[in-house]
Amino acid sequence: MVTRRLAAGVGAAATVLALLTGCAGQGSLPVGPGPERSAPAPPSSRSSDIDLSAVERYAREHFPGVFAGIAVEAGGVVAVYRVPPAPEFDRAVGQELGPTPFVLRDAARSERELQSITRQVLDDAGYWRSQGIEIHGAGPDFVNGVVQVMTPRPDAAAGPLRARYGDVIVVREGIMAFVGPGG
């Protein structure tokens, strides 16, 4: 059974990324005893009694092609993002979370896919530098199903980056300190 406390580390980092990017309410399936929410917020007492990092570890290990991420939304409701359809995953997460209020949210891409693309972009930074494009950071955004790439000149970088990696890439100006779990 999952330890009943909110873990720091990966779970908190995923929540911070969700807070920064916003949480779309589309594709949501309310499950469990709690109400559906659409905007992530810092954990409340209702979500602080569960170890979300343990739930994340379980989901990554058993459902790597489905699991996208976890965020804590307004009111302390846990939002679990997964690539649908995923009935076995949905049941397993419900068992792991027990009475904790949660919702299931559809994701465009799994965490594994977003991490792979993130690594590819970062591994290609030398190539991009030789093309006049500085990559200052990259990281998965599981809420929106994209990889955010940070650069000082997003207008010049967007076309070449999207041509190479596809529409999974969103180019922003700046520096990203968070690369993501396992990155």
Image: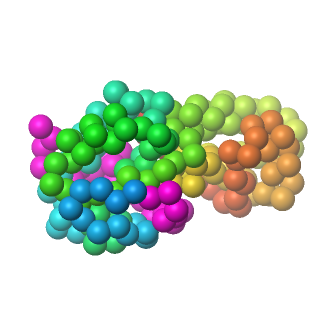
| Magenta-colored stretch includes residue 32 | no
For residue 20, above or below residue 138? below
Q: Position of residue 34 (x, y in %)?
A: 24, 65
Left or right of 159? Residue 166 is: left
| Magenta-colored stretch includes residue 7 | yes
The quadrant of the rendering that contains the N terminus is: top left
- Residue at 72 percent across and 54 percent down: it is 171
Q: Position of residue 89 (x, y in %)?
A: 35, 37
- Residue at 17 percent across and 67 percent down: it is 45
Say if residue 172 shows up in the picture: yes
Pick the front one: 172 or 49 = 49
Q: Which residues are magenta?
A: 1-28
- Residue at 81 percent across and 51 percent down: it is 158
For residue 52, above or below residue 123? below
Extreme top residue here? Answer: 62
Q: Position of residue 108 (x, y in %)?
A: 57, 46
Say if residue 128 shows up in the picture: no
For residue 17, above or below residue 113? below
